[in-house]
């Protein structure tokens, strides 16, 4: 027997942010719109290996559900759940490896290639004035999830470090992660063609 259309539909399930990729920091965030439930997942996972590692789990989900921008052979690109600025991306190997020097040559090469394409895609989508690019290796260096290597690509704009972090330990992140992911995924093919052309002509 089919359900009556008059019956009230169940509310959309609220997704546990622990299933998404992120490198936490000490900041709270102003999310807009307010229905974003990610803030509930601010706490760092207690055990970070195997099935508990968000960087290992993300690729098994759809691009939209996992906030994945692009997938390569050895590495993938994902929105950071805890962005320093809108469009903050992470480039990660699929393999659960902690240290940069333990990454295999194919992983190192593709992390570099995807980082360059990420810069091109972000430049097309949101025209940042600059970028911070790099890895925090080890807890002492500020790695949120040090067990799984990831490279940050953080777009920067003049004045993006405004008064909020100082007075309220809060950063304003005005763009929805899902919207940012879709825009970057749309720009990815053109950015990849530009990168391939630049490498070919070098
Ligand atoms: Zn992992």
Image (cartoon, rainbow, N blue to C red):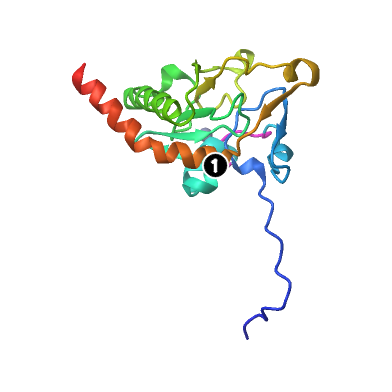
Q: Residue at x 66, y 49 (%)?
A: 15
Residue at (60, 32) in percent of width and height: 22
**Image height check: is 70 above or below 200?**
below
Which residue is identified by label 1? 179
- Image-quadrant location for residue 105: top left
Specify whether residue 72 is in view: no
Residue displayed at 72% across by 32% down: 30
> Quarter of the image containing the N terminus?
bottom right
Say few, some or many: other residues with alpha carbon within 10 Å of mark 1 (under 14 / 14 to 19 / 20 or more): few
> Helix, strand or loop at disc 1?
helix
Please tell me which residue is depicted at 64% across the width and 33% down the height of the picture.
Answer: 174
Image location (x, y in percent) of residue 72: 36, 36
Segment tinted magenta in the rendering: 45-51
Q: In this orientation, which residue lies closer to the viewer: 107 or 183?
A: 183
> Please, is residue 57 above or below residue 25 in the view?
below
**In the rendered view of the protein, which quadrant contains the C terminus?**
top left
In front here: 159 or 92?
159
Relative to 27, residue 181 above or below: below
């Amino acid at each position: 027997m089919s359900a009556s259309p008059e019956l009230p539909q169940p509310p959309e399930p609220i997704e546990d942010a622990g299933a998404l990729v992120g490198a936490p920091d000490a900041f709270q965030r102003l999310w807009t719109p307010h229905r974003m439930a990610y803030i509930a997942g601010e706490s760092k996972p207690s055990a970070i290996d195997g099935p508990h590692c968000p960087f290992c789990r993300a690729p098994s989900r759809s691009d939209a559900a996992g906030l994945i921008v692009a997938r390569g052979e050895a590495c993938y690109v994902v929105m950071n759940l805890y962005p320093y600025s809108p469009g903050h991306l992470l480039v990660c190997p699929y393999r659960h490896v902690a240290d940069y020097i333990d990454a295999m040559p194919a992983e190192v090469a593709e992390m570099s290639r995807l980082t360059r394409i990420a810069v091109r895609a972000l430049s097309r989508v949101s025209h940042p004035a600059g970028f911070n690019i790099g890895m925090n290796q080890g807890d002492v260096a500020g790695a949120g999830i040090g067990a799984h290597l990831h490279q940050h690509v953080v777009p920067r704009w003049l004045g993006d470090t405004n008064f909020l972090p100082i007075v309220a330990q809060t950063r304003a992140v005005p763009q929805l992660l899902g919207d940012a992911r879709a825009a970057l995924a749309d720009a990815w093919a053109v950015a990849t063609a530009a990168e391939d052309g630049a490498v070919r002509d070098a």
